[in-house]
Image (cartoon, helix red, strand yellow):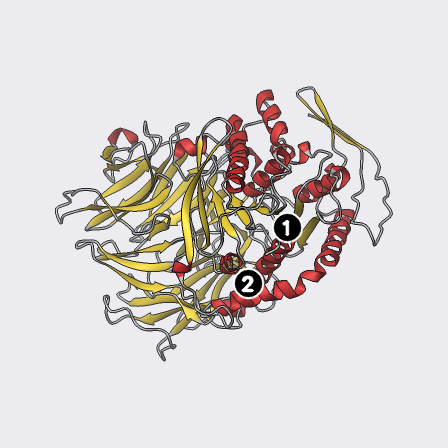
Amino acid sequence: MRATAGATLAVVPDALQPPVAPRRPFTRTVHGDAVEDPYAWMADKSDPELLAHLEAENSWTERHTGHLAALTDTFYADIRARTQQTDMSVPLHVSHSDGSAYWYYGRTTEGDDYGRSCRLPATSREEIPDVTEPSPDEEVILDVQALAQDHAYFALGLAQVSPDGRRLAYSVDTTGDERYDLYVRDLATGEVIDGPVPGVAAGGAWAGPDWLFYLRVDAAWRPHQVWRHEIRSDTPDALVLDEPDDRFWVSVDSSRDDQWILVELASKTTTETHLLRADDPTGELRVVQPRRPGLEYAVELAPDALWILNNDEAPQFKLSRAPLDAPGIEHWETIVEERPETRLLGASVYASAIVIDHRTNGLSGIAILPRDDDGTLGVLTDLTFDEALYDVGSEDAPDFDTEHIRFGYESLTTPVGVWEYTLRTGARRLLKQVPVRDHPDAGPYDPTDYISERLWAESADGTRVPISLVRHRDTPVDGTAPGLMYGYGAYEVPTMPYFAMSRISLLDRGFVFAIAHVRGGGELGRPWYDGGKLLDKPNTFADFVACGRVLVDEGYVAPDRLVAEGGSAGGLLIGAAVNLAPDLFRAVHAAVPFVDPLTTILNPDLPLTVMEWEEWGNPVEDAAVYACMKGYSPYENVAAVQYPAILATTSLNDTRVEVTEPAKWVARLRERATNGPDRPILLKTEMVAGHGGVSGRYQAWRQRAFELAWMVDQVGG
């Protein structure tokens, strides 16, 4: 790779025109292909000229969207009105090693951006206490609102009670760069007794009451080391594991019974897990199965065996069992065979059953495999649900011998509910459903006022692509309605039919909302993911365009009123789709968009790049990958045509998609696109935030209200 650079070309700002980014000569030459990139200088986030440019873009966006204040206020008021702001989660029973037991739950208070983690001494395991009003015995173990009070941004990376219930480990990030400071609090006194351990990664695990295992990241923001820390000790922390392969991320966790520490090393295609007895924290890690290219597995530890979800000769995964003292693959006994139409996602093992999460035919599901007292396995049975489109997932119970598990259920029209399922009898009951409060003007929320349905689009290669759609019952299918289509399509991450409080306002305004389940995601299993990665990545973008055309052709959305939205890798989807079909969309919102992927994936020194080669390919070494990525990269392919109105939102401290990418993309769009004033191209940067955007629920609601107002303003509604 060869690059040349020159001096900045000065640009005189004009208050009546959008900011014009300086151009600096730069040539990228790879595989004999020389490409001029005059905005490559934006890669330096410390460059004062970049910071000034971002501030100028923010000022321009504010100037251009000032008329949206009232509409933004309306959407924000809608969200607040419908949300039960003072609320609590369903208490969860946890038994501790010292013999104590508590009900743990979270509490939110109207007016507070952040919640509080609480607990109540448990006198019964079966009777869930009513914590609507705080009890005199309630203990606030972590007051996140108080911790976040003096910070513009705040996020937790860990909040975990020690196995004996007496200490709390927590870590905080106050900039958005996903580097955390780790603390330990004595829950009896409320005193911080250890820390900070600065600059750690998210996550961690207790080994008994006196030891913590935590992670550190390398210069590319990759968690690559596991460290051992003794509480209230002057002994220096010890390095337990250092993973040199840049493709592998390291994570650390504990088993359900807190008897084991699990260290997982995972690339996009390969896994290696190590075990350590928690009662021997200074001991040696023991590998379950050494890494083998393409072998992925996840370990669940039970008192009697290792249960291993794996893809050994099973692309959609199977469940195997191995002895605790002989965990290698040669001892893996298949318990649940692979089913071609079903992607197995996870297995939770309890005394009376194994609970398996899966996705089948584009829907999530839960299957129960009963176990008798002697370990004999029964018949695998799927839970059934009444709605045609929904999302469901089990929640881990903390006790191996529990009689009950919980699962979450939601749909495009049904708010999230927490259900209890009795493992031996199959009985289920709704413990709590997120309430939708009556709107002062629109009245009560009635899910029967809305219709959800599944559509199918035919992509360019003939593949049928599912679409999940919801609309108000009164919204006509006559080609006049505005519509919002969302997509992601990467990393085998599915976008399931989910409920959103903010969406009600759109539906009541006559919008159609659709999710395009494009290849690259995980909705239809591993083959669906494989069909939208590496050299097949262009399928993702073709699928999205095909889904948009179906919405228009079948009369769900007016030809000039379709909005598209996606974030991160979904922002790449948006950028590539508007290059493919700029006339299909009237407006697009691209959040923290990965729109300059070729530049990023060519640079192994950038965060996440090397491990990303297994997702996108390695354009440094492979000319075919380079050509493929250059062919779909949004930044590389901006044309001199009219684009949709574009709102790009990003964050200065994002470590996953650098602010450089949307800044460059917008600069090139401004340079080449033929848009008039009615189709603005806007960039909005949060100057203290990370990949997830602003923190705090009210700030997040305000941000979402602004985005919705902008979209409605572009297409009417």
Sequence-wise, the earlier of marks 1 and 2 is 1
Residue 186 placement (x, y as % from top left): 42, 67
- What secondary structure is found at the residue carrying circle 2? loop
The residues bearing labels 1 and 2 have C-alpha atoms spaced at a distance of 17 Å
- Secondary structure, mark 1, is strand
Position of 559 with respect to 235 (left or right) is right
Q: Residue at x 54, y 38 (%)?
A: 549
Question: Can residue 415 be spotted in the picture?
Answer: no
In percent of width and height, residue 530 lies at: 45, 30
Residue sticking out furthest to the bottom:
136
Q: Please name the residue shown 57% across and 69% down the image.
A: 149
Nearer to the camera, 350 or 674: 674
| Residue identified by numbered label 2 | 696
Q: Residue at x 32, y 27 (%)?
A: 313
Residue 168 horizontal/vertical position (percent): 42, 63
Amino acid carrying mark 2 in the image: Gly
Q: Are marks 1 and 2 in contact (CB under 8 Å)?
A: no
Work out whether residue 404 or residue 388 is closer to the camera in this orientation and state it.
388
Q: Is residue 263 left or right of residue 348?
A: right
Foreground: disc 1 or disc 2 = 1
Q: Amino acid at mark 1?
A: Thr
Task: Measuring from the top left, give residue 559's x and y in whole percent.
Answer: 59, 43
| Mark 1 nearby-residue class (10 Å; few <14, some 14–19, many ≥20) | many
Corner quadrant of residue 128: bottom left
Classify residue 421 by image quadrant: bottom left
Q: Which mark is residue 649?
A: 1
Q: Outermost residue toward the top?
A: 32
Q: Could you tell whether 439 is left or right of 28 in the image?
A: left
* 460, above or below 242, in the image: above
Q: Which residue is at a point 59% across and 37% down the rendered structure image?
A: 577
Residue 253 appears in the picture as rendered: yes
